[in-house]
Amino acid sequence: MKILSVNAGSSSLKFQLYKMPEEKVLISGLMERIGMDNSFYTIKINGEKIKKEANLENHEKAFEVLVDELKSNNVIDSLNDIKAIGHRIVQGGDYFDKSVIIDDDVLSKIEELSALAPLHNPAAVTGIKAAKEVFPNAILTAVFDTAFHQTIPEENYLYALPYNWYTDYKVRKYGAHGTSHKFVSQRMNEILKRTDTKLITCHIGNGASISAVVNGKCVNTSMGLTPNAGLIMGTRCGDIDASIIPYIMQKTNMDTKQIDNAINKESGLLAISRKSSDSRDIEDGIKNGDKNCILAQKMYVRRIVDYIAKYYVEMNGCDAICFTAGIGENSADTRRDVIKELNVLGIYLDEDANNVRGKERLISTKDSKVQCYIIPTDEELMIARDTLELIK
Ligand code: AMP
């Protein structure tokens, strides 16, 4: 059976076609600059990467071009070969605690939640509507980035703010990257060969979040109402004193859009390093003795360690710490810096094992009290798995 995983952005469409249940990737790729001039796409098939220009005037057209590619590469014979399409949805609010088959009610709830994810949910809705047009017989499913975090208890998801902000405006912690935290924690339990585990999953990429997972269920996560909470990120500040916002707005006459831009796009590693939001550039800077990069990395690591320590205490111990996403999987330096700070808890790094990129591997020493692992994430596969479960 063939299942398509898609992630629709406002001008992009990322896709991966799986043969299920074998979990074999048949073709993957990315359509870019949809609805703009100079649109193009890249596809990866049989280890080969091909880039092509195409007039992708909207998401429907992008799906049509994708179908042509699937047919011309003999990946499908007809549209009906694709039984289901799983869509990544950033915000499911408190409506969705698991993946669901999309009907009119689900679609209208995703639309309604656009207020909480203005950059992401409207794009997903566009993607769903386009898929419906182009694949009229496929079952469409929604896989929410927030669903895995719906098991977080009230004391961890509420903010100590006027209570009617929660009841009237839905202000609470929803978290993000849930599909990744779920994938990584499930894989970790497979490796440990048990499900009664306490895990800390660190999804550290350009966006970054940490979750505490007990017996496969999320009990806390570092992102909040929006993905700008918790860790320091590429361009996002993460946790700050909330009163900084009105203070700076008053001082500078910034409006809400400008301040939102500053805390989401001009902060984080970029602001402190004064160089780049990309951790590879920060690492280069550190090698060259750049003081700002050294400071940025110190602050970055400090915040990760704060959250690991917090969740270690909250869960009353921990069986494994997992590193994933762009930095977690690839940056040996960041993993080393983090684990060094955890020595006080009896957690120790195996330097040789850590010297690797993007490979699933145990990186802690035999006598470390908590095992540390690199677990490469695969959100697209998680979408395909959830979709398969739903249509079975
Ligand atoms: P993601 O958002 O998961 O794609 O992660 C993007 C981040 O991963 C960027 O900060 C990249 O600099 C970082 N990253 C990717 N590859 C490496 C690498 N080889 N070493 C250090 N950081 C990396």
Image (cartoon, helix red, strand yellow):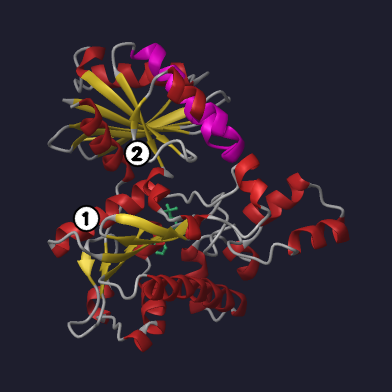
**Which mark is nearer the camera, 2 or 1?**
2
Residue 354 x/y as whole percent: 27, 74
Task: Residue 249: tell me if it is visible.
Answer: yes
Q: Quadrant of ligand 1?
A: bottom left
Disc 1 target residue: 187
The dominant secondary structure in magenta is helix
Residue at image location 36% in from the left, 56% down from the top: 218
Does the closest atom of ligand 1 sit within 8 Å of the Cβ of label 2? no
Residue 86 magenta-drawn?
A: no
Three-letter code for the amino acid on which mark 2 is drawn: Lys
Three-letter code for the amino acid on which mark 1 is drawn: Arg
Q: Which residues are magenta?
A: 110-135
Task: Residue 43: tell me if it is visible.
Answer: no
Q: Is 60 rendered above or below residue 302?
A: above
The C terminus sits in image quarter? top left
Q: Is residue 370 left or right of residue 275?
A: left
Residue count near mark 2 (Cα–Cα under 10 Å), binned few <14, some 14–19, many ≥20 = some
Residue at image location 31% in from the left, 16% down from the top: 68
Residue at image location 52% in from the left, 18% down from the top: 57
Residue count near mark 1 (Cα–Cα under 10 Å), binned few <14, some 14–19, many ≥20 = some
Judged from the image, the secondary structure of the residue bearing numbered disc 1 is helix
Judged from the image, the secondary structure of the residue bearing numbered disc 2 is loop
Q: Is residue 158 left or right of residue 358?
A: right
Q: Is 332 rendered above or below residue 277?
A: below
Q: Is 156 rendered above or below residue 93?
A: below
Q: CA distance from mark 2 to mark 1?
A: 18 Å
Residue 219 x/y as whole percent: 38, 59
The mark found on residue 98 in the picture is 2
In-front residue for pair 183/264: 183
Total numbered labels placed on residues in the image: 2
The N terminus sits in image quarter? top left
